[in-house]
Image: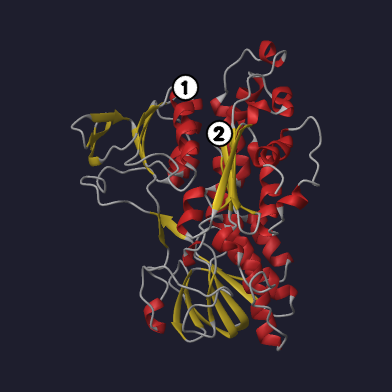
Amino acid sequence: MSEYDVIVLGAGPVGENVADRVVQGGLTAVLIEHELVGGECSYWACMPSKALLRPAQALRAAQHVGGATQAVTGRLDVEAVLARRDTFTSNWKDDGQVKWVEGAGIGLLRGHGRLSGTKQVTVTAKDGTETVVTARHAVVVATGSDALLPPIPGLDDADPWTSREATSAKTVPASLAVVGGGVVGVEMATAYASFGTTVTLVSRGGLLAGSEPFAGEKVAAALREQGVTVLLNTATKSVTRGDDGVVIELGDGSSVSAEEVLIATGRKPRSGDIGLETVGLTPGEWLHVDDTLLVEGYDWLYAAGDINHRALLTHQGKYQARAVGDVITARATGKPVSDAPWGTHVATADHQAVPQVVFSDPEVASVGLTAEAAKKAGYDIRVVDYEIGNVAGASVYQDGYSGTARMVVDEKRKVVLGVTFVGPDVDSMLQAATIAVVGEVPLDRLWHAVPAYPTINEIWLRLLETYGRP
C-alpha cells in the first residue's frame, strides 16, 4: 500500500499505541521505524534499566527483614543480572514486537522516514530504496528524544556513555563517573554501585531538581551509604579520554578518574532529520501541540510522546497516544470531538497530574505539583508531611523503615494538588495518589477511603489526621 489513513513516524510504545487506536477505530495505519520496533523504552530505557535495578532492590529488601536477613548470605550475581536484563530486551531483537504489529492489523515500513510534503512521508530503506506513502487524514510524529550531550570541552572525543550504553553494557566497569543528577543519573548510579562498581556522581545542582527538596536529599544520603561519591553543586569543566579511562576536570579544580563516563544531563528532540523543513517547521526543535496533540498551525500533523516536550515519560506518552489516536479517528469519521479539559480526546493530565517513579533506593514516587510549583502557579496551599516509618504497616514491611510522605493541599478547594512519597517500594502507593489528584477528590471524602491495616497505605490516614478535618 502507498496510501493509509494515518502514518506514524516512530514505532516505539507511543507510535504503537497511536496506530493501534486508529486501527481499532476502523482506519488504516502504518508504522515507520528505522531501528527496533518497540523503541527506546523496550531496549534502552524503562525495561532494561528496571531489570538492572530490581535484583539489588530485592536483595536489600530481604536484608532488612529479620529472619530473611540471616538467610541472605550471598552477594549479587552480576552476570545473572545482565543475563536477566537481556531477556527483557529479547537480546535486542524485535521479532515479538513485529508479530504484535502484524497481528493488530498495522502496517510496518522499515527505514528512515522523512516528511516530504503535506500528509506525505518518504521512507529510505537501508539499501537506499525509497518508498513514498501518503496519509488520507493524519501524520503523527512519535520519534521520541535522544540523550543530550552538553558542550563540555573534550567530551565529543571521550567516547562517553549515554543511557543507551549504560543500560545495554555487556560487562561492568570497575569505575564509573556519572555526570548529571536527574532520574537517569540517579538510577544508573544506584544500579552500578550495586554491581560493585566504584561510582562518582557529579551534579551541577542538587539531585532530582524537579522533585520536593527532601527527595533529592534522601537519595543523596542513601547513595553515599551505598558507597557512591556524590558531588553536588559541582560543575564539569572538561572530559579527557586516555589509555586508562577518562579524567573529568571539575569546577573547583579537582578531578575524577574513571574507566567510563556516563552523561545524563537531559534529552533533545529526535527531529533533526525527519523533514520538518518541508512543511515549514524547524529541524531539531520540539514540536508544540495543543491538548489534542495537534501541531500548532496544522490540521493534519500531530506529535505525541517526548517529541512534544510535554512530559518525557513513557506512560505519559502512551496516554497521549490514546488521546491522539481516538481524536484522529473521531475527526476522520465525523464524530464529535471531546476536547474540553479531561475529555476523551485531550491529554489534560500532562499539565498538573503527571505521575513518576524514580527507582532509586529509596524510591521517589510523585504525582501532581510540588509545594514550590503550586506556589508559583498561584495556589494558596498547605503542606502536610509525615514520617512513613511511623505507620504500622511500614514496620511490618521492613525493619527500621524510613521514608517521608508529603501532601500539598489547595486550601481554597480542599483538594490534593500533589503527593510525594520517598521510601522503599513506595511506587505501589502512587496510583491512589494519582486518582486523588486527577479526580480532585475533596479531603472530606478521602476520609472515607479507609486504608487496610496493617499496610503502608495507612499513610493516607496519617496525612489526613495531621491536616485535620476540613
Where does residue 89 sit, x and y in percent of width and height?
59, 46
Q: Are marks 2 and 1 in contact (CB under 8 Å)?
A: no
State whether residue 450 is above or below residue 219.
below
Instruction: Check disc 1 and report the residue beneath it.
Output: 225
Residue at horizontal 45%, vertical 47%? 164
Where does residue 369 sit, x and y in percent of width and height?
54, 53
Mark 1 crowdedness (10 Å alpha carbons): few <14, some 14-19, many ≥20:
few
Q: Secondary structure at mark 2?
A: helix
Outermost residue to the top: 70
Q: How many marks?
A: 2
State whether residue 449 is above or below residue 135.
above
Instruction: Check disc 2 and report the residue beneath it.
Output: 82
Q: Residue 226 versus residue 136: which sits nearer the camera?
A: 226
Residue at horizontal 49%, vertical 43%? 212
Q: CA distance from mark 2 to mark 1?
A: 24 Å
Where does residue 144 sit, x and y in percent of width and height?
49, 62
Residue 210 lies left or right of residue 37; in this view the side is: left
State whether residue 94 is above or below residue 330.
above
User: Is residue 37 among the parts visible in the rendering?
Assistant: no
Q: Residue 213 versus residue 21: which sits nearer the camera?
A: 213
Of the numbered discs 2 and 1, the one sitting upstream in the chain is 2
Where does residue 432 sit, x and y in percent of width and height?
71, 48
Disc 1 marks a residue whose amino acid type is: Glu
